[in-house]
Image (cartoon, grey):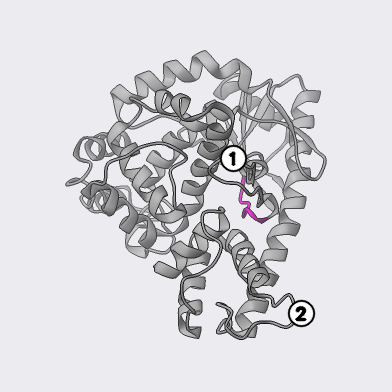
Amino acid sequence: MKLFFEIMHIAVGNRTELTWTPSSSEWFEVYEVIVNHALIGVCMSAVSTIHRIALDDEDGEWNQQHRTQNLSDDLYIQWTSMTRQIYDRNVVVNRQCAELQNMLIADGLRSSILKGQALALLYNLPKTPSHPHPLELTPYRQSGDIDIWIEGGQKRVYDWLMSKGFPTKSPGAHDYKTAIFPDTLVEAHFSVGKIYNWFANCSYQKWQKKHAEEQFLHHVTLTTGEDITTPTLEFYSRFLLAHIYRHFFCEGLGLRQVMDYYIVLRHLQAENGEDVLRSNHASFLTRFHNALLYVIHEVFGDTAGLSYKETPEGRYLLKDILSAGSFGNADFARVWTDEPNRFKRHMKFLKIQSRYLRHFPLDTLWSTLYTAM
């Protein structure tokens, strides 16, 4: 994983070049990891950085000692082609986000775009004392579904979807999945989710309710010109941590979700300083958050000023994330939601949960109880 980590460090500005010249097989292996974690475009930006540094300024020819000399032409072409598709896809989804919110505004409903295109905007990282060079990664974040939080509760969201004739599946724990656009799934949230740990969830729900109003009033302009409403940085700092927590214990956690959180921390550090960050995360999912900070440090090269202790939980979390891939899709043994028999589905889930019992015993028990209900 050394090559993967160094590429990620370069992508976020914590390194400028590789420490050795990888072989052709190492490039193919790291590309597979990058694809599994939906980081194709972000990592391509790092490869481009390596290329620029390797260019001989005197005669304009590539220095034969540059670190990407064993990256095959076929793989490079495939990689750049995928990156271009990500760029084009982001243009489409940006437009769809604005279109969806305008539909809701016309019907008197307020909404807020969660994650996705709103978070991609934050991938343009500002210059800070610890990171002297700004980065422009917004076009390269790999988009997925559109997650939108609609004000008014479950019944109001359902009634609006039915009034528009949008095909809608049975509700999940906090959203309806619906086909508003032919090429993009929309998850219409009537809440922004819970935490399996009952005690942590009480605190989270109280905080969420207190700050809900401002999330429907925070306007941003996307790089392609569309205006949307999205949560604030402070809201994201807790919402994404809860989101990561749920993914780890339920579906499988990939590094794109972890990178989203890291990007938010970088912005908070730039705007508010490290003391605000420490205060904001002092007592929220403390054990899991400490392990997550270890993962962030290993993968991205820093923790945006937040301190952590290296623990067995952190090392385990990193190992599990790397093997899982985005949404757990790289580890077929953890896929349980497609099992049609409810009893077999729950037994498979219990088998997966047993992996976490040693390192996160209380949270594992809470997630198992929550899923069983």
- Along the horizontal axis of the image, is 25 left or right of 71? left
The amino acid type, in three-letter code, at marker 2 is: Gly
Residue at position x 67%, y 65% in the image: 83
Q: Quadrant of residue 43?
A: bottom right
> At which x and y percent is residue 207?
45, 18
Q: Quadrant of residue 165?
A: top right
Question: In the orientation shown, which residue stands out farthest toward the left?
Answer: 358
Residue at position x 66%, y 22% in the image: 216
From this viewpoint, is residue 54 visible?
yes
Q: Is residue 79 above or below residue 46?
A: below
Residue at position x 65%, y 29% in the image: 112
Question: In the orientation shown, which residue stands out farthest toward the front?
Answer: 58
User: Which region of the structure is painted magenta?
Assistant: 140-145
- Along the horizontal axis of the image, is 234 left or right of 45? left
Residue that carries the numbered disc 1 in the rendered image: 128
Residue that carries the numbered disc 2 in the rendered image: 60
Label 2: state its secondary structure. Answer: loop
Queried whether the magenta region covers residue 142, the answer comes back as yes
Q: Main secondary structure of the magenta part?
A: loop
